[in-house]
Amino acid sequence: MKSAYHQPWVYNLSVIKDAKRWLKHDLISQEQFDKISEEYKTPFYHPNLIIRILLFIATLLAISGITGLLGLMFADTGQTAISILCILYGIGSFVMLEKVFINKNHYKSGVTEAILYHSIGFTIGGVAGLTDFNSPQLILIACLLGFAFAAIRYLDLLTTIGAVASLAGLLFYNCFEAGGIFKQIIPFVFILTFSPAYFLTKKLQKRGDLSLWSNNLLVVESLSLLLIYVSGNYLVVRELSVNLMDLTLEGSNDIPFAFLFYFFTVIIPLTYLYFGIKNKDSVLLRVSLIVVAISVFTFKYYSPGHTEITLTLAGTVLIAIAILLMRYLKTMRGGFTRENLLAHSWGNMNVEAILISQTMGGNQTIRTDQETGGGGASGGGGASSGF
Amino acid sequence: MLIFFAGCVAGLFIDEPVYLIYVLLIYGGCYFAWHQAKVKKSFLFLLYAFLVGYIATTFVLADTIFDAEPSLWFLYSILSCGGFIYFVVKYRNFFKQA
């Protein structure tokens, strides 16, 4: 599936954004930044965060007005008709998003997100209404398809989260409904599903033709890591077993395979941390810090004591570690520094080469054949038949 | 400026006809904030002016016209928010400078 946005312009915008970051960190001068901005021009309307939030809220209010008026018109048509109308309205909103806003070069302007979520909401809501809200399986499939479509076509990160969550929900629901042994192996099904998903995502991130979706893949990568951990976390497994599977635990009773989940709760964060440091993988490092905190909470949850003392001590230790690390990493050591120098997408690029190409005037803006007409296949006098 | 607007908005919601005084005060404050936004190229002042002005206008309309005809709410939200979006997109250069 193709993205709704023009790929070279998205690339140019990301270059300008990164150049801004470089300028902020004094890696380039204002003159160099101006040259980069000139070379990588993009017609996209992509305002700053505050304007985007304002536009998002304003668009939601405006389309709620349209929805309200339509609601008044069709309020008495019955549930099935309303559900079908909701689906049509959702699809119509998708069309309006593309034809009216994306064609006028809106790129994640706040307006596009509001209309996108509105469209997905109505499409999924319509499907749910058709099933009388009684078929979680169908609703989850509709969510998965809707969110995945929006994530791929409109490069949206929230819908990427939605798609991964829908997939996880679908897996959980099917295993839960299957009952018996499938209920017992839900954590292992999740680990066995999201571990390959993580490695597949890592592999896809290396493909140049998928660079447009690098942020979406980053989200899938982080969520896969989190889901792998959560599936093996003792607290999550125990509480879900008690609440959803009617498991009664009294006295010294414990959940089945408890030792395995204790092991996962300890070993997964440490594994993430180890490979994060070893491979200098910022995603693994960040996720590992989150899951270490969840692991500490898990063990603290089942061994109550003086929480206030534990929290104070933990906070003191963490502050001390943070201060020591900030001082230690003031100068780069082993490839690590406290400075936020470059964005992820630029992590593997040769900064020096880009700077030289921009300042010496040797760079050309990427142009597709579609824009330039493709040129002739032969030199000399005019274009060939291959035009 | 923020405290002035916060006081005026609080005054709007007192359940007495005297709230119209606060509406006038808000509009006065909006004009001042708009002027300051232009002079100082400050987006924050513009934001204050717009948000508080919108709250005051919506409150007055809700208390007068929308009470009589509730379906006007929808038209109002479409026109006011659509107008805001149009304004922001049309005058994008102003916001870039601000």
Image: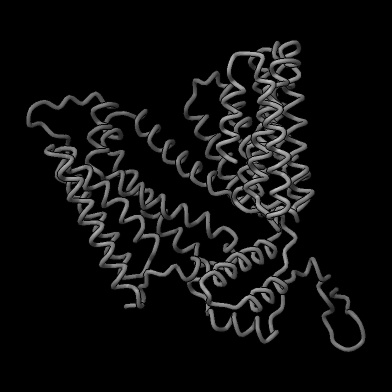
From the viewer's side, name the closer residue of A70 and B43: B43
Q: Residue furthest right?
A: A381
Number of marks in picture: 0
- Going 22% across and 35% down the picture, which residue do you hit? A238
Task: Judge whether A222 appears above or below A311 on screen.
Answer: below
From the viewer's side, name the closer residue of A118 and A237: A118
- Going 32% across and 51% down the picture, which residue do you hit? A290
- Going 54% across and 44% down the picture, which residue do you hit? A159
Name the side, left or right, on which A335 lies relative to A319.
Answer: right
Quadrant for the C terminus of chain A in the image: bottom right
Task: Judge whether A64 appears above or below A43 on screen.
Answer: above
Within the image, what quadrant is residue A172 found in? top left
Q: Residue furthest bottom?
A: A380
Q: Position of residue A203 (x, y in %)?
A: 46, 64
Q: Position of residue A17 (x, y in %)?
A: 60, 64
Q: Position of residue A65 (x, y in %)?
A: 71, 26
Within the image, what quadrant is residue A171 found in? top left
- State the colouring used for the structure image: one colour
Name the side, left or right, on which A134 lies relative to A381.
Answer: left
From the viewer's side, name the closer residue of A282 and A54: A54
Q: Residue furthest left?
A: A252
Q: Position of residue A157 (x, y in %)?
A: 54, 49
